[in-house]
Amino acid sequence: MTMWSPELSGQVGAKSQAIVSALSQDIESGQLKAGTRLPTHRELADKLGVAIGTVTRAYALAQRRGLISGEVGRGTFVGASGVAAARAETVAEPAIVDLSRNLLIRDAREVKLVETLASIRDQTEFGQLLDCYQTAAGAERHRRAAAAWIGRAGFPVSFAQTLICSGAQHATSVALATLLEPGDTLLTEHVTYPGIKALATLLRLQLRGLPVDSAGLQPEAFEAACRAGRVKALYCVPTLHNPTASIMPEDRRREIARIAREYDVVIIEDDVYGFLPHDAPLPIAAHAPEQTYYITSTSKSIAPGLRIGYMVAPAEAFERLSTTIRTTTWEAAPLMAELVTKWIEDGTADATVRWKRSETQARQSLATGILGDFYEAPPHVSCHIWLQLPEPWRSADFAAQAQKRGVIVTPSEAFVVGRGASPHAVRVCLGSPRRRLQLERGLQILSELLQSSPEPALTVT
């Protein structure tokens, strides 16, 4: 048996993860050879001055990563494949686990990208894509592909009402700049996507948050705000709401649509996560197409670097929206729009969505297993968690102490509209780490933090 005792002083994160990191480094450096027998749980716990359970969790995590193997009655050993696994982890995993960004990157698409770009280069329209300006709303072929992409889930869309934008954030800014004037009131959920808060500030709009529950925006609150007057628009995320991950049921969507029609309030519907759930209800736009500006993009569903967004708008607003696009960017990048169109046509886009659904489901299951009683997974797949914090944790304190241990999450204050009370919750994004092993490490740290108490605050005198 080795006298191995890990050096933890330079490690980031919880003690169990620090042990695994030290083990990985010592295997990779050659200090620990394949077949080396490791200390028992109790022996290592005594050496390090930690609980036996901490060592047990560390050994279990190391075994899942392929670093070690355990044999009943014989002990724990460095695995035969441990060196390769340790080297792979050293290359793949940064010290900080960033769970603050909502994205999921699919690897191994370089060959397909090169093939598609080559096919674009060889087509007769390549010169027009590269050297000519398109119409502000986008080329007709690109808009037809966009309409087909949006409509594949049973929401029929006309290409004549579809505009190509430079991502969903650009589409939202185009809608707001076209429909509202400085000083106008824009309604949204009480906790909402921070990007809409930034746009409201930029355009000098009055942003008002409305109550939400487990099913999303409350229709009675929306109607009360409309009845009070001076409301022009509502921005909402009915499917996989950001940050709560709720999905608004169909009857509530119909009610929101009815209220919008009655009070002549336009709806800006953000559906960038709509591709993930298999059985989400139809968008609000399906129930009030004359009132709704439906927005989605390829950033979440295909790749964030493409920066192509789609907006489906009432026919009467098409030209005004086109003018705003021309004023802000002249047009979305035609080469990027062509690349996305190719991937929609040849099935690459749908294949990517299928992979992302599967990978997100696997990561959500991983989170359920690690976070245990602290997280109850919703009945639908979601790329982010609205993690409710136990007493006495507060959102900002938890996020700060998580970052101190090497994990970045987003506190609820980032999503709250106005100066209202912030929920005791943080958003945890499951897709940011490239590897599940890195996600697992971050979730383990959060789990251990949830089971601890906040560090004492400095006394103010």
Image (cartoon, rainbow, N blue to C red):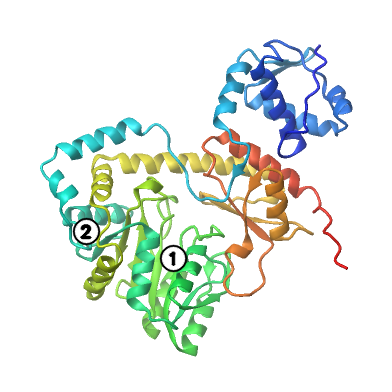
Q: Position of residue 235 (x, y in %)?
A: 44, 71
Q: Which residue is mark 1?
A: 250
In terms of depth relative to the viewer, which is nearer, 332 or 386? 332
**Image spot of residue 62 (x, y percent):** 68, 26
Q: Residues within 10 Å of mark 1 (few under 14, many from 20)?
A: some
Q: Amino acid at mark 2?
A: Gly
Q: Residues within 10 Å of mark 2 (few under 14, many from 20)?
A: many
**In the rendered image, which residue does mark 2 sit on?**
138
Q: Secondary structure at mark 1?
A: helix
Measured Cα–Cα span from mark 1 to mark 2: 32 Å
Q: Residue at x 29, y 62 (%)?
A: 329
Tell me the amino acid under the disc marked 1: Glu
Say above or below: 84 vs 223. above
- Marks 1/2 in contact by CB < 8 Å: the verdict is no
Q: Is residue 287 visible?
A: no
Which quadrant is home to the C terminus? bottom right
**Disc 2 on helix, strand or loop?**
loop
Residue 231, quarter of picture? bottom left
